[in-house]
Amino acid sequence: MFNKQDGHDIKEIETIVGPSVKIKGDFNGHGNIIVEGIVEGSLKCGNMLSVKNKAKIMADIEAKDAIIGGEVEGNIKISGYLEITSTAKIIGDIEATKISIAEGALFNGKCTMGLGGKPVHAPETHD
Amino acid sequence: MHVYIYDSYLNQPKYQKTLSRIETRITDLGLNGKISRLGLMKNVNEVVQSEIRRGAKTIVVVGNDDTVQQVINSIARTGVPLGIIPIDKKNNLIAERLGIPCQDDACDILSARRIEQLDLGLANDQFFLTHAAITGEGTRIEVKENYSIELKEPGEIYVFNLDVGSVSLPPNVFINPSDGLLQVALITKHSKKFLFSENTVESIFAFDKFRLVNQKKPILLDGLFPVSSPVEISISRNSLKVIVGKNRSF
């Protein structure tokens, strides 16, 4: 249950929000975080964030890397790699350096990619 | 000077041989000191505090986990190192985690005098070494003014400083008594159905300060001392000097 999340091995976990737990407020963690329960407010993670299938997050998310498999209502800002699995339901804007979205995932929002999360503009073309 | 605090249960005749062996070993190693035997009429905290006032350089507890836990509040923040000589293999998980073997083998650890500074948990004004526990029913964890955690199902809340196996933790969750954090483990009845599986803890958090609020139930420190809620819990950094062995678990 705690060893692997969608095939990704998390060696040391600082926080696990279990399915019977509800967090209200500004949640801030420095290490790896696994969410299986409910989070309302805002969620900041200094390392790897893993949102499991049954998790419900009604919060803006900031993390270094993330795997989203649950429901998220809020904006997601990832400085590194964001993986959205097939069970994810995301309503909100996404910002990340690298993104993968699996088939079946639901995503309604704006997606911005690029170095440091800054939007990448297409080069101007001269006819 | 070393001061040896013998727990009252060691007054039983069956421990005489063990204690003689330990005393011989202590003499051989040149660690002789004063022996204070606890009894029903002796308050352990008064004994320890009075010995520290008289200039004890090391307080050595001879007994089990309960004996160690009883001296924590009188030795915390004094700077005087705590040594442990565990007598029985049962109920000596603190010594085990600190890498201290049983009986006369523990004297060699005392002699090597490898000292570690451990954090202690502080619940209101009472220290705890291993853990604090409270029922999850009706308990709210308030981390900041705008951040709280609640259990949606009945269960228990454990606050760990030093893990002595009170609950089975997930394999990649580590508890280090010198990292400046307390681990808060939430166990629900749902997860208790899998009591014999490896993972019985549902949620884990790491905090250095928070508040536990329960209108009805107290929190139990180190499995022995009740404290009424609401309880302000914080980490007290490097508050306990302990003589440890090489095989400690952190």
Image (tube, grey):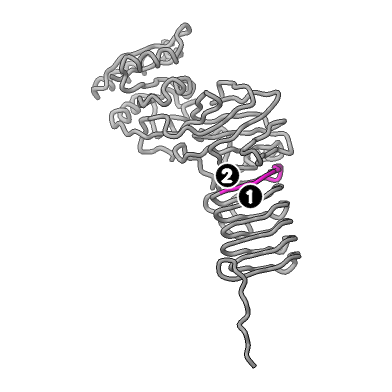
Query: Would you identify the image quadrant in which residue B79 lies?
Result: top left
| Residue A105 seen in this snapshot | yes
Please state which amino acid type lies under the numbered disc 2: Pro
Measure how far apart labels 1 and 2 are at the Cα level: 9 Å
Chain under callout 2? B
- The region drawn magenta spans A17-29
Depicted B71 relative to depicted B115: above or below: above
Q: Residue at x 32, y 20 (%)?
A: B22
Residue under the image location 40 percent in, 13 percent down:
B47
Residue position for label 1: A1
**Secondary structure of residue under mark 1:** loop
How many discs appear?
2
Q: Chain of mark 1?
A: A
Q: Which residue is mark 2?
A: B170
Measured from the top left, where is residue B190 in percent x and y? 71, 39
Q: Is residue B85 left or right of residue A13?
A: left
The local crowd at label 2, few if under 14, some if 14 to 19, many if 20 or more residues have their Cα within 10 Å, is some
Instruction: Please tell me whether residue A124 is drawn above or below residue B198 in the rendered image.
Output: below
Q: Position of residue B33 (x, y in %)?
A: 29, 17
In the image, what residue occupies the spot 28% across and 21% down? B26
Quarter location, residue B215:
top right
**Placement of the C terminus of chain A among the 4 image quadrants:** bottom right
- In this rendered view, identify the residue nearer to me: A12 or A97: A97
Is label 1 on the same chain as label 2?
no
Circle 2 SS class: loop
Q: Amino acid at mark 1?
A: Met
Is disc 1 surrounded by few (<14), some (14 to 19) or many (20+) residues within 10 Å?
few
Q: Are marks 1 and 2 in contact (CB under 8 Å)?
A: yes
